[in-house]
Image (spheres, rainbow, N blue to C red):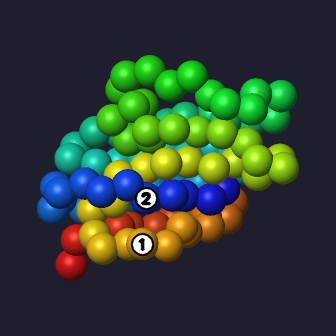
């Protein structure tokens, strides 16, 4: 799973984890959203609220899942998250 960041000017930290391949859980501001992207037959996913608050775009490129998510810091590089990893992104 590759995360691409877009600007966001909120300073509250977000955390996410990939409990299974192509599944992600995002927690931010007291809200939690779990999304399953395991259907490899879908090239571009149609996202609706409340998922759109956390994941702005999702697509597959050569079988690899790509997500566009808001950045709460000065991140200008994409980040790869592997199955079983937990990460916290903060503005500090």
Q: Quadrant of residue 36?
A: top right
Residue 2 vertical position relative to residue 34 in the rendered view, above or below = below
Q: State the count of labels.
A: 2
Residue drawn at x 43%, y 50% is 69
Give whichever of discs 2 and 1 has the lower sequence position.
Answer: 2
Which residue does the numbered mark 1 point to in the structure image? 76
Q: Quadrant of residue 2?
A: bottom right
Name the element at disc 1: loop
Direction bottom: furthest residue: 92
Q: Cβ–Cβ below 8 Å for labels 2 and 1?
A: yes
Say which residue appears at 15% left-offset and 62% top-offset. Answer: 11
- Residue 67 in percent (x, y) is at 56, 48
Q: Quadrant of residue 44?
A: top right
Mark number displayed over residue 39: none
Is 63 positioned to the left or the right of 37 in the image? right
Which one is nearer the viewer's eye here, 26 or 19? 26
Residue 64 picture location, percent across and down:
76, 52
Q: Quadrant of the C terminus?
A: bottom left
Residue 5 is tagged as 2
Residue 4, given in percent of the width and then of the height, sits at: 51, 58
Dot 2 crowding, Cα within 10 Å, few <14, some 14–19, many 20+: many
Crowd rating for badge 1 (residues with CA inside 10 Å; few <14, some 14–19, many 20+): few
Residue plotted at (58% across, 39% down): 58
């Amino acid at each position: 799973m590759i995360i691409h960041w877009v600007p966001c000017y909120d300073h509250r930290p977000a955390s996410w984890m990939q409990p299974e391949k192509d599944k992600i859980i995002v927690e931010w501001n007291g809200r939690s959203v779990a999304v399953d992207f395991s259907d490899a037959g879908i090239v571009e996913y149609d996202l609706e609220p409340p998922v759109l608050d956390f994941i702005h775009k999702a697509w597959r490129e050569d079988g690899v899942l790509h997500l566009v998510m808001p950045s709460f810091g000065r991140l200008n590089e994409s980040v790869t998250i592997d199955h079983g990893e937990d990460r916290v992104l903060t503005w500090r």
